[in-house]
Image (tube, rainbow, N blue to C red):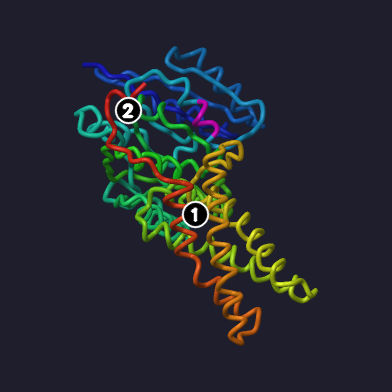
Amino acid sequence: MTTTLSVVIPCYNETATLDDCVDRVRAIASDDLALEIVIVDDASTDDSLEKARALAERFPEIRVHFHEKNQGKGAALRTGFRHVTGDFVAVQDADLEYDPNDLVRLLGPLREGKADVVLGSRFLSGGAHRVLYFWHSVGNKFLTLMSNIFTDLNLSDMETCYKVFRREVIQSIEIEENRFGFEPEIVAKLADLRLRIYEMGISYDGRTYDEGKKIGASDGFRALYCILRYNARRAPIAIQFLVYVLIGAVAAIVNLVVFALLDAFGAPLMVSVPTAFGIAAVVNYLLCVNLLFHRNARWNDFVEWSLYALVVVGVGAIDYGITRGLIENGLAPLAAKALATLLLPVLNFAGRRFLVFPTPKRGPWEPRQRH
């Protein structure tokens, strides 16, 4: 039985390798494997788009889409995934760091009906590997470890380009990241759907920065942010609490700094404590929404706003009571405020996690959810 593999090729200034890339992808077609190749040019400044269009004129299985403005790899993949029609979908970088022949092997568990997604790992036994940057490999393994902690998967290479999906799976996922944050984002969302994920060793022919490598240190920090943003809300409670402790630490510093400033200017306790707590609560809320609970602030949602206000007022009252009680028992105001702040993280986390931002239960991926 013939199946169709849609290969999405994100392209930005890859004129030196694009022809070879397409030739090598086309070479994996066989009697039982048809190809659909979707090239997405991300506003290249060289002649990559012209080359892609010339290739599409020569080969009917190739289609080309382009962006007027450079947006990043994630944005190019988002465009490509939207237009694919094959049974399965794979990503192929135009720089040929990955060997298209490996895609045939990665398709095995998908075609057998055992997997929904198959990832190619550069760190498992596979083909030849070019020896390059040590610290890049350390960074990749660290990011994979962090991702695994939050997703409860045991991947060896979260950052791999080679991810092959059933088409209905990838088209059901909203991709938000525009750049290399796509990798941790998609792994988080695949784990969230409780899909059948397989991993296989692949070869890797990495290139140097002189040869056109684009990923940098800033993308590593963005990946770490994405791991927190897209995973934290469904991580085990203990991990969620640790993330909240970090958020709470930032809010606590804001709380103490504002209180110290107001106290230094002689503001009464009835003003300084609630004001400092209120400003810290806003900082806490914004960080919770963007990192821990991954939701947009919906200030027009009356129920959410009311629950949040209830939590803030309740915890704020406890904060004021503890601070005032400690001061009345002879503790210095700043020390009393600091001690009260240290006692509140559990109440703050519980209120936000179980009242304001409850996480709906999700079962495993089911056919009726696919579209």
Mark 1 packing: few (<14 Cα in 10 Å), some, or many (20+)? some
Magenta span includes 76: yes
* As drawn, 191 above or below 284: above
Residue placed farthest to the right in the image?
A: 265
Residue 166's disc is: 2
Q: Name the residue at 74% across, 72% down.
A: 268
Q: Nearer the viewer, residue 140 or 347?
A: 347
Magenta span includes 223: no
First in sequence: mark 1 vs mark 2: 2
* Picture quadrant where residue 257 is located: bottom right
| Residue type highlighted by circle 2 | Arg
The picture places residue 206, in percent across and down from the top left corner, at: 45, 47
- Distance in Å between CA atoms under marks 1 and 2: 27 Å
Question: What residue span does the magenta drawing correspond to?
Answer: 75-79
* As drawn, 347 above or below 295: below
Q: Which residue is mark 1?
A: 224
Q: Secondary structure at mark 1?
A: helix
